[in-house]
Image (cartoon, grey):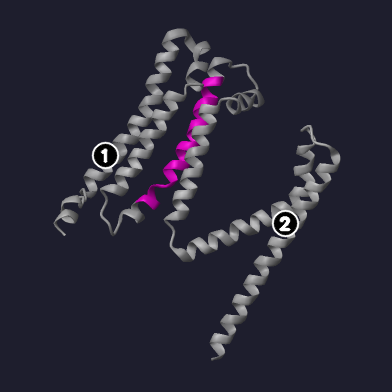
Amino acid sequence: MEKKEEKAVTPWSEKKLSLVWKTLLILALGVLAVATVFFWYQGGWENIDQLTNSHAVFATFLGLIAISFFVQYRFGVLERRKREIRRRVPVLFVFGVGVVVFAAALLWLKNPSASPRSIISGVARTPAVLGSALSLILGGAVLGFVLLPRGDQKRVKSVLLIVLAAFLTFVGPTYLLYAAQWLPIPYSYLALLGLACFAVGVFLFLRLFGRESRTESSGQDVSRR
């Protein structure tokens, strides 16, 4: 019992926790700002590719954001910390989109005459930027899902499965195959892929609607009793 009491973490005050959380996020943005000024000073906007391809800079940026959420969980009040973290999850989506906008702006400053298509393709060819954006967005989605109550988790799963089933049934045999034609895949394999997408989509639809009908019937039986 004495060892457990020694290891127990004293929760921080809400004001202190909020201050540290915001400070870490500001430091994360500061890393990008300082790195931008540094690389620009070294060689102007022509040198900015070194920033968009710098894994160290974006790893530090992600690390500070991760630490900010860890501190929120570690030192938050036990009864409120999940709710507080769930309230802050949208910041991850904002930062994820912001990284892409930031990289696109840098590429535009490097070449103001570039078309939007070339800027988007330039962002897509930078693993550090794309990986950071996807990590933040997917991390926010996973964290938000994990912190939901079980009932809400089941509803979210059902919605995602319905969207996946609709995508596989209607998009899989059409637009997905059209996009796959640009890949070096034989046509017979593409036909099998389209058929497999359609079959899996229909199977998911039948499974989901069958589950809902069973739930409704069981609910009616309980109400009759």
Element at badge 2? helix
Of mark 2 and mark 1, the one earlier in the sequence is: 1
Of residues 17 and 173, which is closer to you in this image? 173
Q: Specify the quadrant that holds the N terminus.
A: bottom left
Q: Specify the quadrant that holds the C terminus.
A: bottom right
Residue on which disc 1 sits = 20
Residue on which disc 2 sits = 200
Left or right: 129 with respect to 169? left
Residue, x 44% and y 49% (percent of image)?
143
Residue 179, above or below 72: above
As shown in the figure, which amino acid type bears the numbered disc 1?
Answer: Val
Label 1 near label 2: C-beta < 8 Å?
no
Residue, x 80% and y 36% (percent of image)?
185
Residue 137, above or below 144: above
Magenta-highlighted residues: 85-107
Which x, y percent locates residue 125? 60, 25
Which x, y percent locates residue 216? 61, 78
Which x, y percent locates residue 67? 34, 38
As shown in the figure, which amino acid type bears the numbered disc 2?
Answer: Val
Quadrant of residue 95 within the rendered picture:
top left
Q: Which mark is residue 180?
A: none
